Image (cartoon, rainbow, N blue to C red):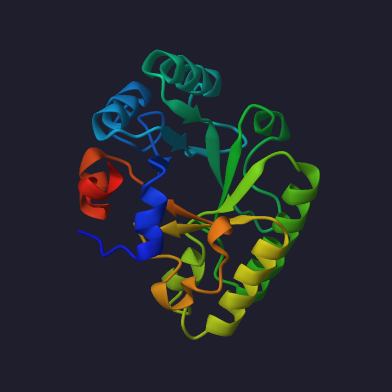
Amino acid sequence: MAKWSKYEQKQTAVKHLFHVHTKFTDGSLTVREWFEVARSLGIDKITFLEHIRENPTYDVRQYLDEIEFCSAFFNIKGVKGFEAKLLPDGFLDVSAAMLGDVEVLGLAEHSFPSDLKLFIDSWRRAVVRYKSEYPCLEIVWVHPGLWLKKQGKLFEMREIYEKMLYEAVASGISIEKNLRYNLVPDEVEHIIPREKLVIGVDAHSLSDLASLCNYSQLT
């Protein structure tokens, strides 16, 4: 079981299951099955952050409609969201038209080229662009620092990493405390205002959820 800080325990009191994936991409549960899990755990709110591309491989309308239907059926707030990866040109891999249909946008760093300067420059452009162009959209930097961690540079570049976190918060972007990757690391978490930090399970399956958190603390 994951070791949760006092802050994380406080967060689970609001009964919010943030950042789950479904069978529409690489998850093993359907939208409805996630709602059934939420109901069994006494969860009041579930945020879906399904992977997205500018040219998606699944029926996006069906994904969004299923969340709306199940939200009403189970009387559990279902939040529609996408997780979009950062591109070298400072855009995210999602069309502008699709962003009008969701409430939350997760900014991710998957498969970015191995170029530190390009990564930081692209990230900064994306933060400024999407926060200014979509002021009503909740933007969350998900598993923040994953690129640095996979490059083996997270603690070597800790000063840069902390500066990026500060910049994101100053821009109005929320930060995910991602339990799957232990990002933000505990040593850095204190620099993020509590109101800007959200606990994310990044779960693709029920076993993921079981391994990442203690059910007794979710209920």
Q: In percent of the image, x 52 and y 22: which residue is there?
A: 64
Please identify the quarter of the rendering in which residue 23 is found. top left
Q: In percent of the image, x 41 and y 25: which residue is there?
A: 76
In the rendered image, is residue 89 in sight?
no
Does residue 166 lie above or below 81 as drawn? below
Please identify the quarter of the rendering in which residue 195 is found. bottom right
Q: Name the residue nearer the viewer: 65 or 98.
A: 65
Q: Is residue 213 left or right of residue 10?
A: left
Q: Is residue 91 left or right of residue 215?
A: right
Q: Name the residue nearer the viewer: 65 or 59.
A: 65
Q: Name the residue nearer the viewer: 1 or 41.
A: 41
In the rendered image, is residue 118 in sight?
yes
Q: In percent of the image, x 47 and y 27: which residue is there?
A: 77
- The image position of residue 17, as x and y in percent, is 39, 41
Does residue 26 lie above or below 78 as drawn? below
- The image position of residue 172, as x and y in percent, is 70, 56
Q: In percent of the image, x 38 and y 41: which residue is there?
A: 15
Q: Is residue 125 left or right of residue 63?
A: right
Count up the numbered dots. Answer: 0
